[in-house]
Amino acid sequence: MYSEKISKGTTLDLDATFNCGQCFRFNRLDDGSFGGVAFGKSVRFFDEGENVNVQCESKEDFLLWCDFLDIGRNYEQIIGSLSGEELLYRIADYGRGIRILRQEPWEALCSFIISQNNNIPRIKGIIERLCESFGDRLPSGEYTFPSAQKISALSEQDLAPIRAGFRIRYILDAAHKVASGEIVLDKLKTMPYEEAKAALKTICGVGDKVANCVLLFGLGHIDAFPVDVWIKKVMDSKFPSGLPECANGNKGIIQQYLFYYYRAHANELETE
């Protein structure tokens, strides 16, 4: 087991990052760490005051987890750029520990298809059943996320035990398109935003909201701005003319700040 520390600074809060609705396979464990599986690997993140201790398999894996936590991005600078907008700065400052996780693209796509019209406990349950049924068992006892190739070989009947309902048809269509090469997710990372979104929306059941979640959390389009019922209410109440210009280039990060803040301050969402 390899262990190395990351300095938290003022912009890395494990609890805020893993509990803001952007990922579904990381949980707080009995030892206080946040643990989970991504990229076919198991990891544990321990909060140790000024640092996060990362326990993983190797130095190479440690660098992977640093990238996963988006350590290379200057979130302090992003928050500072909002200082001219009092409300937006206050919201960002409240959520300054949130980082946008750089998730594996196929897992992000499949997970956010599952998330449609769903709540987080049920989303997590479906994903865990999917992984336990069709992923590979790791030495830790956890399971990897099954590949698009593996899922594409399955039928609706095969997937029935994960209890995903109408979403099974969407999962299979996504798996077929990715496994066949009709959609190459890594290419969407460098494709212009609108083109990448249009490509994702060719998948059955993928609309603007799911496409933007995949673009933001799985493909590195940091300006993608997912809008669900909650965010729509926030925008209608507080930013009816849209976000100020200073948000451009980082709207996806700001979307997470908005969600995190107003989930804790829902009483402020009365339309003025």
Image (cartoon, rainbow, N blue to C red):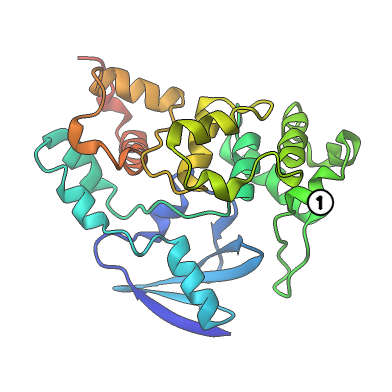
Q: Is residue 32 in view?
A: no
- SS of the residue under disc 1: helix
Which amino acid type is shown beneath numbered disc 1? Lys
Residue holding disc 1: 150
Which quarter of the figure is the N terminus placed in?
Answer: bottom right
x, y percentage for residue 91? 23, 40
x, y percentage for residue 239? 24, 23
Q: Is residue 166 left or right of residue 94?
A: right
Q: Residue furthest left?
A: 84
Q: Residue furthest top?
A: 272
Relative to 66, does residue 145 appear above or below in the rendering? above
| Residue 154, quarter of the rendered image | top right
x, y percentage for residue 196? 51, 36
* x 46%, y 26%: residue: 228
Q: Is residue 229 in view?
A: yes
* x 57%, y 40%: residue: 120
Relative to 114, does residue 15 appear above or below in the rendering? below
Q: How many labels, in total?
A: 1
